[in-house]
Image: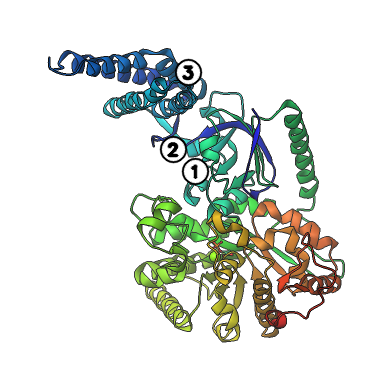
Amino acid sequence: MSFQVFGLPVSRGVAIGRAVLVASSRIDVAHYFIDAGRVDAEVGRLRAARDAVAGELSLLKRDLPVEAPAELSALLDVHLMLLHDDSLTGATKQWIVDRHYNAEWALSAQLEVLARQFDEMEDDYLRERKADLEQVVERLLRALARGPEAVLVPVATAGARDFAGEDPLVLVANDIAPADMLQFKGSVFTGFVTDVGGRTSHTAIVARSMDIPAVVGAREASRIIRQDDWLIIDGDNGIVIVDPSPIVLEEYRFRQRQSGLERERLSRLRHTPAVTLDGERVELLANIELPADAKAALEAGAVGVGLFRSEFLFMNREGNLPDEEEQFEAYRAAVEAMQGLPVTIRTVDIGADKPLERMSVHELRHEHALNPALGLRAIRWSLSEPAMFRQQLRAILRASAYGKVRLLIPMIAHVSEVRLTLDALARAKQQLDEAGRPYVDVEVGAMIEVPAAALMLPVFLRYFDFVSIGTNDLIQYTLAIDRADESVAHLYDPWHPAVLSLIGGTIAQARQLGKSVSVCGEMAGDPAFTEILLGMGLRSFSMHPAQITSIKQRVLRADTRKCGQQLEAVLRPDDGFVVAPGRQMPPDSQTDLPAATSML
Ligand code: PEP
Ligand code: MG
């Protein structure tokens, strides 16, 4: 039966494929693909585990004390029967053969299928046998853990070669950490669905950077979607269609083809300069997570990197952090790949939904800090680890000898933080001087992503050469909405007048004081905001490479003189709220602009 699941659209396009559930709600096991040549060996592991469990159960039965209740012996018989039933071990073997799942994943996938069948049984006695099934599977998993290890390819890095099926795959999970998401780049999956997450959560940002259709915040998706279900992911509208009818499937295949053609058409703009109809030049830069992304940035026609999120070098590591040499090599690789174009490297922004260790947002929230987004994050964390911070600064400075580097500091809110940061930079330079290492005096910029910084901009601008507005956090902190929490996602509103006022005010004041200003949050890559931002005076946008040509098309069609008028129209208030395109405004609402917009 076909049904739909609704979530938040975070990465455009349509993906059609079979569901791969990586996080079973029942039993948590590792998910890996096995190499094609190892399928027989993996089936052998399963068989050995089954025989071991059969031996265990038979022994238990044999050694039952005479006074034990008869039900116990009957129960062991049930377990033995389940163990040998083809619907358990036979079907599990099929997941290994057909899909190249590791035995543990295959077992949990089959448990999921059988558990649903048990849940639907009318007979109470039979329904309760599900618990027995789970016990048998747990025994099998334990036996597998004791036996020889498989030769595995982590699911995140698996390519088409590791997967035996013909059908494309889409990943369904309760949650995917940003660092794990990053590993899915170039993997076998053509789309993603998660139960949790907001539009600008870092998991969503990474999905967008991969240009793969994704829906997050789909609440119950991983519970109600079954392993192997056919899915359509409509990344433009935040809809997941489960088990679609042939007509719906055909309609979406048509849309898929159309959007492919549209992308191809847009890609012809790659090397066209971004100039508005009235002759204003606009700088379109790329956001990258790893040095390897620089290639996509160049291919998309970016004129530089406006944001290199260096924290992705620090995540997903087994305990150790990248040392100065490793970081230097990574920064140098990005700088050299950009062939003389500027690369803005942001110092590490660890914390909130980007934990250092492999940890879900949920774990982070519940085990470490009550409000991680308000906690030891970004520059706060760097200043609390002075040696680590200087090490990163040295590595970035050293990369400046190989191309044009700019240094960007995240989440500045206090002048004291600015002073400590500049002291650390001076010390790092002194250390490089002493060691005789070459570097260039790089420009230093601040991310404006805390309202305090936007409101005190002239003070901050005394210390910095440029600013970059991080709208993702600026919205989060202005509206007190956790950007990664789907339960308040409807209140995460980039059109809120307070938000637009802070952005407009920052752009206007930076320009007035002769400092360059850019936007590197998700708003920069959203065509709905291009004219508004141009109307505010913005001439530098930084976004995922995949979004550059769409934004360029908007720029080429824009007339900045008209954008100013458009901005005023958009800011006309309706009970104090912005009338965004698509929002209804009552005909008699002609009140003045709220005070918050006066900064514009
Ligand atoms: C932002 O906050 O807008 C930003 C670009 O930084 P990040 O998304 O990495 O927090
Ligand atoms: Mg930010």
Q: Identify residue type, mark 2.
A: Ser
Q: Identify residue type, mark 3.
A: Gln
Mark closer to the chain start, 1 or 2: 2
Q: Do residues under tags 1 and 2 come within 8 Å of each other at their CB atoms?
A: yes
Q: Is residue 276 left or right of residue 81?
A: right
On screen, residue 130 above or below 63: below
Q: Do residues under tags 1 and 3 come within 8 Å of each other at their CB atoms?
A: no
Q: Residues within 10 Å of mark 1 (few under 14, many from 20)?
A: many
Q: Give me the disc on residue 174.
A: 1
Residue in front for this viewpoint, 181 or 61: 61
Q: Secondary structure at mark 3?
A: helix
- Which label sits in the foreground, 1 or 3? 1
Q: Is residue 59 left or right of residue 317?
A: left
Q: Position of residue 168 (x, y in %)?
A: 61, 30
How far apart in space, not on screen, are marks 2 and 3 (Cα)? 22 Å
Q: State whether residue 290 appears in this view.
A: no
Q: Do residues under tags 2 and 3 come within 8 Å of each other at their CB atoms?
A: no
Q: Give me the disc on residue 25.
A: 2
Q: Identify residue type, mark 1.
A: Asn
Q: Position of residue 172 (x, y in %)?
A: 54, 38
Quadrant the N terminus occupies:
top right
**What's the residue at 39%, 50% (across, down)?**
317
Report if the beta carbon of the residue with label 2 is closer than 8 angstroms to ligand 1.
no
Residue identified by numbered label 3: 94
